[in-house]
Amino acid sequence: MQAIFLKSLRKASANGNATIIEELQRITQIEKSELFKQRVLLATGDLLTVMRLLSVRDVRTLYMRTPVHIKDIHENLSYLVPFASLFHIRMTGAAAILHTHFGKPNVRPEDGPASLWRHNEVLKHKNIPINQAFKYRTVQDLVFHSLYARLLDIVQIESGHESLTRFGEHLAELSDDEAWAELRRVVSNAVNCFTTPEEADTDDVLRNSMLFIRDALLFRCFITSIKCGNTAMIELILKVWAISFRGAGRTQYATELLRFRHNLVHAWPKPLCDLVLSNMLVNMTGNQNGWKETDLLQEHMNYWIKIIYKARGSNASWKWLSEISPCITVLRELATQVNTTLAPRNSNHHTTPNLQADLEALTKSLEESKVHEYNPARRLAKTLRARDVLAAGLHSLQSYNSPIDKFNKYRFGAQNPNPNEPEGMGDEDERNENTSNSQESQNEIQFNVVVDNGDGEDMDPFDFD
């Protein structure tokens, strides 16, 4: 990674993003190289950046229906290959799970015993404002803790023992190979059984929990795949999210993932596909599980420049930021070496809290409510039933005026000639469409703005380890 000096450029427009690309070429002087004229340039970032770059590129190429065309490959930006980065996709996945499975606040316990709102109340955590700014880490922790408790509960049910302790004692009596095979069989059966919502039949409480386990497992697998650099699994999950994001109302990211999938399968040659997939993640430490998203690394850089190493008081200026920004990597390495050499005492102030109390409280709530025990009489009102985002997304793609038809028609242009024309939607989609786009853009701003840890201390807001 090569950091360059910071400049004050307006990027809050499509032309501003194009100006930044051209300025990067001028600073690095790669435009003077004859080899550069024969190569493509990858550009990644959040969805808004990608859409702006695509719009500028489309306006400047022959694909747009305008009488004026710029045929110079460097002027029309046709060498750019923009794609959305994984960190912002991850945040969209977290927001989709929260809005889908949050439930209705202040309902009776029997009407939502396993909703995220109910579990947040069981843990006695601060209320999460569903329609206001919320922190990504808060949402991720709630989703993971709820998922872990449900997995423990369904494993105990599938094992046939009265408790996990008894199941553990049973495994201890077996040999290592037999115990491992038994554990894998039980866990595999539990996951297969409790991630199929059709098995719940008329039990809406069980169905809601099954849908959450399925969606949350995909989210957890996505994060784990990023950490270990498993791009094949990441590609597979993005394929599923291209459908489920549309069912969850995240239509803009769903369209971007659809475009990304189309390019991987039909448009890009294999060398370009390999190039894109191999540049989605970076590993700055060399550790086995030290991979992170490229846009997360950029967020780290922004944090270090704007918060840690910025000048204070009258010394704060663009000149200082431009001088210090290329040195961020060296300064971070120097700080790490000094800390390692001096071996300071490591406190436990920021250690990961023990999950035992949270898991015990959640599993107790699940057992008392018998969430994962089939009861055909547990029918809920339509507003209390969680949405099957995968089925809703598939229905949307197969409906009249399908988004796939629109995508195939306008895939060479980022702009829809009739922006007021609705995409193919089901009944529930049509009711939520008026708020989904504004809510999606609002959440993107919220995740980027809310970075304080609540106690007034400086911290890295994007450290999720």
Image: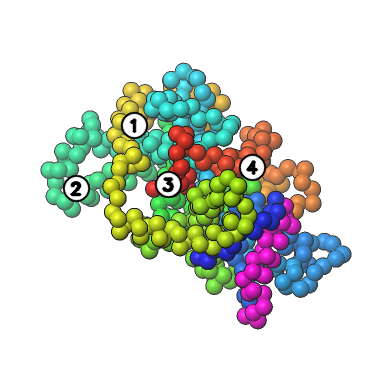
Give the residue type that dot 3 points to.
Phe
Q: Which residue is mark 3?
A: 464
Residue 43 placement, left or right of 417? left
Q: Which residue is mark 2?
A: 179
Q: Earlier in the sequence, mark 4 or mark 1?
A: 1
Q: Residue at x 33, y 27 (%)?
A: 361
**Disc 4/disc 1 C-alpha distance (Å):** 32 Å
Q: Amino acid at mark 4?
A: Ser
Marks 2 and 1, the one that precedes in the sequence: 2
Distance Cα–Cα, label 2 vs label 4: 49 Å
Say if the magenta span includes residue 19. yes
The amino acid at mark 2 is Ala
Give the number of the disc on residue 441.
4
Q: Earlier in the sequence, mark 2 or mark 3?
A: 2
Which residue is at a point 23% across and 50% down the rendered structure image?
A: 181
Alpha carbon separation for disc pair 4 and 3: 23 Å
Query: Label 1: which residue?
Result: 358
Q: Which of marks 4 and 2 precedes in the sequence?
A: 2
Q: What segment is highlighted magenta in the picture?
A: 13-35
Q: Nearer the viewer, residue 164 or 121?
A: 121
| Helix, strand or loop under label 3 | loop
Q: Look at 64% across and 74% down and name the residue there.
A: 29
